Image (cartoon, rainbow, N blue to C red):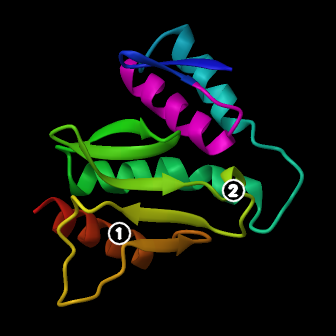
Amino acid sequence: MVLPTPGRAVFSPDPAILALGLLLALQARPTGPGAIAISIVVGVTNQPCRSPPVRVQAVLPSTLHAVIKASAPALTPRLWYGQPAYAKDGKVVCFFQPAQKFNTRYATLGFSDEAHLDEGAMWPTSFALMELTAADEARIGALVKKAVS
């Protein structure tokens, strides 16, 4: 499937990556017939239920996108090794790995070596995500702010 995004097309059978592509396309063209078609496609996530449920995992990219853009508006969405990612000055700071991509039971939010998350001699660089609560969103927002500081 080919989806238009600002300046780029997304080619992927992965629903999480397509969801991010659709979200970016909707932001680029928020009104008109394209927006209606995109809204309808985003709403279609009925796939066989796995652990975690695909429909829950399909919501994660759009929720993460909103949290990351609210926390660090300077970050630019892009694809990095086929994964949704966010870059600062062309260098990836954080990325999202959908559970379906690697057939795992959880999605992953990861941070690259460009992220400023250092805490002593050891610190986490990735986090498993099954679903997002308000507390999780606040924690991710704080991590992203720290990563780009």
Quarter of the picture holding the N terminus: top right
| Disc nearer the start of the sequence (2/1) | 2
The three-letter code of the residue at mark 1 reads Ile
Q: Residue at x 17, y 90 (%)?
A: 120
Which residue is outermost to the top? 33
- Which residue position holds label 1? 140
Inspect this view and state whether residue 133 appears. no
Quadrant of the image occupied by residue 53: bottom right
- Residue 32: x, y in percent? 49, 10
Q: Residue at x 20, y 53 (%)?
A: 72
Q: In the rendered image of this protein, does residue 32 appear above or below residue 77?
A: above
Q: Secondary structure at mark 2?
A: loop
Question: Which segment is the magenta one?
Answer: 11-28
Q: Which SS type dominates the magenta stretch? A: helix
- Which residue position holds label 2? 102
- Residue 52: x, y in percent? 74, 67
Q: In the rendered image of this protein, does residue 46 appear above or below residue 129?
A: above
Residue 23 on the magenta segment: yes
127 with respect to 123 (left or right): right
Q: Secondary structure at mark 1?
A: helix
Which residue is outermost to the front? 121
Q: Residue at x 36, y 80 (%)?
A: 124
Of tags 2 and 1, the one toward the viewer is 2
Which is more toward the observer, 12 or 57? 12
